Image (tube, rainbow, N blue to C red):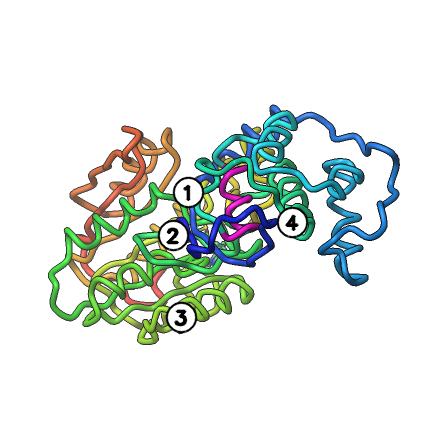
């Protein structure tokens, strides 16, 4: 969502606006990191005095950080939009990310940045831009820098306490909405993180009773804040491990996007800014998937659905394990990239009593 305050485009420096945008390029992090080159501090860590926009100690401290990135003397200069984007590109930042960060710093839309790239940028906006470029180049997801991420067209607050919701997880929401009747249903979202899945379902089906579970108190606090912000306060948030907080509830569906990356998967290195506890699972990434599948049998009514997101290579073994556990109608669905991503299974072997092993 670009924003353009419609301010006159006179040749006055553009100042920092603090506006928040939501964009979809978190997954450029690894690419940005792999191509970035080290920044040198031109002229050492000294600042030109009397730079407009650096009025107080806080600005000086921020510009000190930024100076270590773009070169202290560069931040002090009044530079144009074009010059800043050019410099970001030379540092290895992808054009889209650089534009989005400059949009945040200036409050101008991307279209305006492109149409008027000769405009000078105020020192304070340069400082913000440089600091956020540095964070992005270190591999930090754009969503953490912006503090938000759109999921299912809902703006969600995110922080390093939660996984950044992925677009492919919307398939899990779609499958749940397709399989279940629109009338009152009881659903649990296990490992809710930012609340993405639970809140998307709550938004689409206000009449459903939804319980959202996470083992992380920090994640649950954020998920609850998202529920309040979105006015979806009928979701019941519970702290605990997988099905344990469900008590003796019987449900129509259990959905989960659990950690499923193998603990020794080299791909984890590119995801280092996100919580490991949200990403990695033992037993080649299957441990949490299988724990949930086992526990869910005691909480699904006969005919209830289990929907699991998983890694693109995990579908065959997961299907076999689900069949062994007594599930039927096991079907895997591919995500928009054509990769096997979500498996649905129906509990058909009769309800196990809570407490049965
Ligand atoms: C892959 S993230 C999914 C977050 C969110 N549902 C989404 O799709 O964006 C997995 C979540 O499971 C949570 N988690 C990890 N172990 C757990 C456990 N034993 N019980 C409950 N939640 C757990 C993590 O804290 C994390 O929020």
Cα–Cα span, label 2 and label 4: 29 Å
Cα–Cα span, label 4 and label 1: 27 Å
* In the displayed structure image, the side of residue 73 where residue 104 appears, left or right: left
Residue wearing tag 4: 122
* In the displayed structure image, the side of residue 203 where residue 230 appears, left or right: right
What residue is shown at x 38% (from left), y 58% (from top)? Answer: 155
**Residue toward you, 14 or 2:** 14
**Residue toward you, 78 or 8:** 8
Residue wearing tag 2: 150
Residue 281, placed above or below residue 5: above
* In the displayed structure image, the side of residue 244 where residue 171 appears, left or right: left
Q: Which mark is residue 24?
A: 1
What residue is shown at x 19% (from left), y 50% (from top)? Answer: 346
**Kind of element beneath mark 3:** helix
Cα–Cα span, label 2 and label 1: 8 Å
The tally of labels here is 4
Q: Main secondary structure of the magenta part?
A: helix
- 2 or 4: mark nearer the eye: 4
**Residue toward you, 213 or 160:** 160
The x and y percentages for residue 7 are: 46, 55
Residue wearing tag 3: 229
| Residue 200 image-quadrant placement | bottom left
* In the displayed structure image, the side of residue 27 where residue 60 appears, left or right: right
**Kind of element beneath mark 4:** loop
| Residue 190 image-quadrant placement | bottom left
Lower position in the chain sequence, tag 2 or tag 4: 4
Contact between marks 2 and 1 (CB within 8 A): the answer is yes
Query: In the rendered structure, which segment of residues is drawn in magenta?
Result: 97-107
């Amino acid at each position: 969502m670009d924003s353009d305050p419609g301010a006159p485009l006179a040749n006055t420096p553009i100042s920092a606006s603090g506006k928040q945008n939501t964009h979809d390029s978190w997954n450029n992090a690894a690419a940005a990191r792999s191509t970035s080159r080290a920044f040198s501090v031109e002229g050492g860590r000294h600042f030109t005095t009397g730079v407009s926009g650096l009025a107080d100690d806080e600005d000086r401290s921020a510009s000190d950080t930024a100076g270590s990135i773009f070169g202290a003397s560069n931040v002090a200069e009044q530079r144009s939009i074009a010059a800043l984007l050019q410099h970001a590109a030379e540092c290895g930042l992808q054009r889209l990310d650089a534009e989005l960060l400059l949009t945040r710093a200036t409050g101008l839309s991307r279209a305006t940045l492109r149409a008027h790239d000769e405009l000078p940028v105020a020192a304070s906006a340069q400082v913000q831009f440089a600091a956020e470029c540095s964070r992005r180049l270190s591999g930090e997801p754009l969503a953490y820098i912006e503090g938000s991420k759109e999921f299912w067209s809902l703006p969600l607050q995110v922080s390093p306490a939660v996984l950044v919701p992925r677009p492919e997880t919307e398939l899990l929401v779609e499958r749940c909405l397709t399989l279940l009747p629109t009338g009152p249903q009881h659903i649990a979202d296990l490992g809710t993180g930012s609340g993405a899945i639970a809140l998307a379902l709550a938004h689409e089906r206000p009449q459903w009773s939804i319980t959202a579970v996470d083992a992380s108190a920090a994640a649950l606090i954020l998920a609850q804040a998202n529920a309040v912000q979105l006015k979806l306060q009928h979701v019941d948030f519970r702290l605990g491990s997988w099905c344990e907080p469900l008590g003796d509830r019987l449900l129509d569906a259990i959905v989960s996007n659990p950690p499923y990356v193998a603990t020794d998967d080299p791909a984890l290195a590119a995801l280092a800014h996100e919580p490991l506890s949200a990403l990695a699972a033992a037993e080649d990434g299957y441990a949490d998937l299988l724990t949930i599948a086992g526990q869910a049998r005691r909480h699904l009514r006969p005919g209830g659905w289990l929907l699991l997101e998983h890694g693109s290579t995990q579908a065959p073994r997961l299907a076999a394990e689900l069949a062994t556990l007594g599930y039927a109608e096991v079907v895997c669905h591919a995500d928009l990239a054509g990769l096997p991503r979500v498996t649905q299974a129906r509990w058909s072997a009769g309800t196990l009593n809570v407490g049965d092993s």
